[in-house]
Amino acid sequence: GKSAKLESQFKVSYSIILNMFKKNNSETLEEILGSSFIEAARAKKKDEYVEELNSLKLLDEKDNWQPTGQQELIVKEFYLAAKEYLDCRNEDWSTGIRQ
């Protein structure tokens, strides 16, 4: 038969972190959490995520994606509006910081 997917119900609390620091003599919280089951699963997919992120960055830099259908056209319009908003917001933040 098929085995059920195992999902951890483990929640990190302040006391757990303190105990882990004491027992593991770890330098940082990242080192401690990096050894958890969840992080191990994420680490396996890290290369895949980095590759996907890099391809999205290339699309953003080129900004030459052409929609082929109605749904893609809606996504493209949303993307351009969101990009314009974020650019304006960044300008406002930069201006506000200088003042």
Image (cartoon, rainbow, N blue to C red):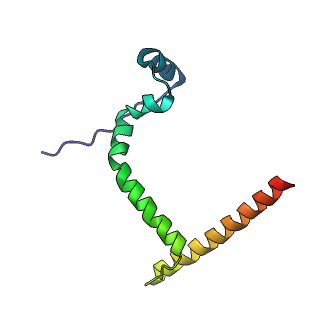
The residue closer to the viewer here, 55 or 36, is 55
Q: Which is more toward the observer, 8 or 59? A: 59
Vertical placement of residue 80 versus 14, above or below: below
| Residue at 52% over, 75% down | 62
Q: Residue furthest left?
A: 1
The percent coordinates of residue 75 (x first, y second) are: 52, 74
Residue 10 horizontal/vertical position (percent): 41, 30
Question: Percent position (x, y) of residue 77?
Answer: 57, 77
Instruction: Name the quarter where the N terminus is drawn.
Output: top left
On screen, residue 93 above or below 28: below
> Looking at the picture, how far across and down is residue 7, in whole percent?
33, 38
51 in relation to 72, above or below: above
Q: Residue at x 47, y 66 (%)?
A: 56
Q: Nearer the viewer, residue 11 or 81?
A: 81
Q: Which residue is found at the position 35% from the left and 55% from the top?
A: 48
In this view of the protein, which residue sits in the foreground, 15 or 47?
47
Q: Examine the image and state in which quarter residue 91 appears.
A: bottom right
Q: Is residue 84 left or right of residue 55?
A: right
**What is the quadrant of the C terminus in the image?**
bottom right
Instruction: Pick out the residue farthest to the right.
Output: 99
What residue appears at the point 67 percent right and 64 percent down from the top-left corner? 86
